[in-house]
Amino acid sequence: MAGRALDGVRVIDLTQALSGPFCTSLLADQGADVVKIESPRGDMLRHTGPFGEDDTARVYGGVFGNANRNKRSVVLDLKVPEARDALLRLIDEADVLVENFSNGVMERLGLGYDELAARNPRLVYTSIRGFGDARGGASPYAHWPAFDIVAQAMGGLMSITGQDADHRVRVGSGIGDTVPAIFAAFGTVTALLEARVSGKGQYVDVAMVDAVLAVSEVVVNTYSHTRTAPEPIGNQLRGFAPFDVVPAQDGEVTLGAPHNPQWAKLCTVMGRPELITDERFDTDDKRWINREPLYEIVTAWTSSHTVAELIELLGGIVPLGPIFTAEDIFADPHFAAREMLPTVEQPGTGRDIEVTGVVPKLSRTPGDVRHRAPLLGEHTVEVLRAAGLDEAALTALETAGGTVIQEGVLS
């Protein structure tokens, strides 16, 4: 069996909620040994649903399970000196540390970058915070806590999302967490590659609002060129037409044919070849300027067909797609062929559940979802023994309140 791209990389995961765990799950999917350090009460996300009706144990919900697959869990109360010492032993042999505590917390615990880099100079130290760390630029909001909705709002995405300027909305998924996580994983792997050459680690600083801004290209591109702030325009994209959700007899589909080659193909299928050279619509810019009469023509045609008919007529010819619900996605052959819904055991239910699959498909060293998320402290004994702690040291650590030895317990 082929190896994985990050086999042999040890990651100490000091994260909770979604942004940090999602970042480290991407590393774990590619083979990194991710050791998740949790307090005795566990990651706050363990207690968040969804839970199946048959899940009476409720050791963790769907969001935690998806973001923490392929990891091992160790319980350490870092306020206890013995636990901090055990963590330092793990860090000394690690390649990466990822954390998403509020500014200053790691320093107060004696686990700041400067202290750890002095112990382990090759350590890549990645942090994800709402407004970043001073090392990457001192934000006036550095002390503000942040959630996904704050990142979406202050990163500009909410300013362009919604039906109009009076109805701005948050994007439905937690991309204010997951997009920063993707940037953090990219930065971490980039720093790891450089460390293989230089032998030195470095600090990787990701601000959630920065990451959201980076994918809100409409905000930057429009304002930088025109000094006007773009506003929400529903499902359209400024400067592109047709590019929208359009009606069918029995539902809706998404349609994009904003450039001349696509527009010509659409006109041909509609049986309206004269529109290709119509002076109102013969350039990309004119189609946007004259979008109201354009959409009247296009939607009158799409409304005369069912969704299935539109897929048959336009699928593979111009960009078009139905709006899939979760039920549709779970039944669609694309996601099965791409292994985007692998299953893992859900503790306490006796059944397997689907999680999201690995997106980048590496041909020689493919990543994979190998096992479920860990129970709280499931691997404490295993990991700490491997780090050199004997039975007496483990007992002393537990007696001091630095850990809870509950390996394999569904509670």
Image: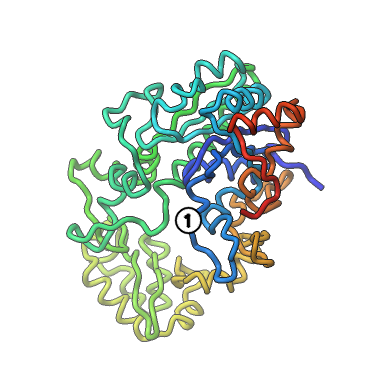
Give the residue at x 45% y 29%: 205
In the image, is 13 to the left or to the right of 236? right
Give the residue at x 50% y 24%: 203
Residue in the foreground of this view, choosing between 202 and 118: 118
* Colour mode of the rendering: rainbow
Q: Quadrant of residue 261?
A: bottom left
Residue 362 position within the rendered picture, expressed as x and y whole percent measured from the top left:
67, 47
| Residue position marked by numbered label 1 in the rendering | 48
Residue furthest right as drawn:
1
Per the image, label 1 sits on a secondary structure element best described as loop
Residue 395 position within the rendered picture, expressed as x and y whole percent measured from the top left:
70, 31
Residue 226 in sight in this render: yes
Residue 94 position within the rendered picture, expressed as x and y whole percent measured from the top left:
65, 27
Number of callouts? 1
Going by the numbered disc 1, the residue's amino acid type is Thr
Residue furthest front as drawn:
399
Give the residue at x 44% y 80%: 307
Residue in the foreground of this view, choosing between 355 and 171: 355
Residue 218 in sight in this render: no
Give the residue at x 25% y 45%: 222
In the image, is 236 to the left or to the right of 226? right
User: Against 214, is 79 above or below?
Assistant: above
**Label 1, residues with CA under 10 Å away: few <14, some 14-19, many ≥20:** some
Q: Quadrant of residue 65?
A: bottom right
